[in-house]
Amino acid sequence: RIKEQKPPYLPQFEEAKEEVRLSLINELTWHKAKENAGELYIKIKQSLTENKSFEDTAGELGLEVKTTEYLTINSYIPGIGPGGEFTNLAFRIKVGEIGGPVQTNAGYCILRLDEFQGIDEKKFEEEKDSFKEKTLIAKRQAIFDRYLEELKKKANLVSHLLTNQ
């Protein structure tokens, strides 16, 4: 229930001051984090040309290296959140390459692709027809449901059923 409704208004500076200050701090923090991540990315790239390992360089820079399980394009990554740009980048780089920095809910990440596992062709061939059939059934049902909704609208049906409230 709505207990009270206030008309929209522009708050006075004093009312909005703290919220604006916090918003600005947040924006500047993300900007500085992006700059720092970019600098770290350059240092890591340079160290790789000197045949240092990714892990050693990260350790020297005071960074933590974490690994993930295999990802799909829509993966949720523990400690990071929804994959989004992270997984998009992971799918664009080649094995052994590093990419980034990429913004996540937890901050900026620099990633290295250690392994890529393509689709299992044999499993795909086994499940292809079943998946195709399920998809067609779902599409047919959606089209039929839309058709019924349009018929109901055209017929101007009114329900006189009693409901328990």
Image (cartoon, grey):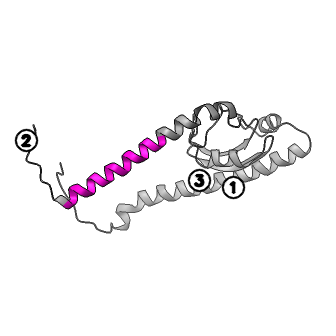
Of residue 159 and residue 69, the one placed in the foreground of this image is 159
Residue drawn 69% across and 46% down?
91
Amino acid type indicated by mark 1: Glu
Vertical relation: 69 (above or below) 98: above
| Mark closest to the chain's N terminus, 1 or 3 | 3
- Look at mark 2 in the image and give the residue it sits on: 162
Given this view, does label 1 or label 2 mark the residue nearer the observer?
A: 2
| Mark closest to the chain's N terminus, 1 or 2 | 1
- Name the quadrant containing residue 62: top right
Residue drawn 42% across and 57% down?
18
Q: Distance from label 1 to label 2 (Cα)?
A: 63 Å
User: Is there a contact, CB below 8 Å, between mark 1 and mark 3?
Assistant: no
Spot occupied by residue 59 in the image (x, y as percentages of width and height): 78, 35
Q: Residues within 10 Å of mark 2 (few under 14, many from 20)?
A: few
Amino acid type indicated by mark 2: Leu
- Name the quadrant containing residue 112: top right
Residue drawn 86% across and 43% down?
48
Q: Residues within 10 Å of mark 1 (few under 14, many from 20)?
A: some
| Mark closest to the chain's N terminus, 2 or 3 | 3
- Look at mark 1 in the image and give the residue it sits on: 35
Q: Tag 1, which secondary structure?
A: helix
Is residue 141 rendered magenta in the image? yes
User: Over which residues does the magenta segment extend?
Assistant: 135-154
Spot occupied by residue 89 in the image (x, y as percentages of width and height): 68, 48
- Look at mark 3 in the image and give the residue it sits on: 29
Amino acid type indicated by mark 3: Thr
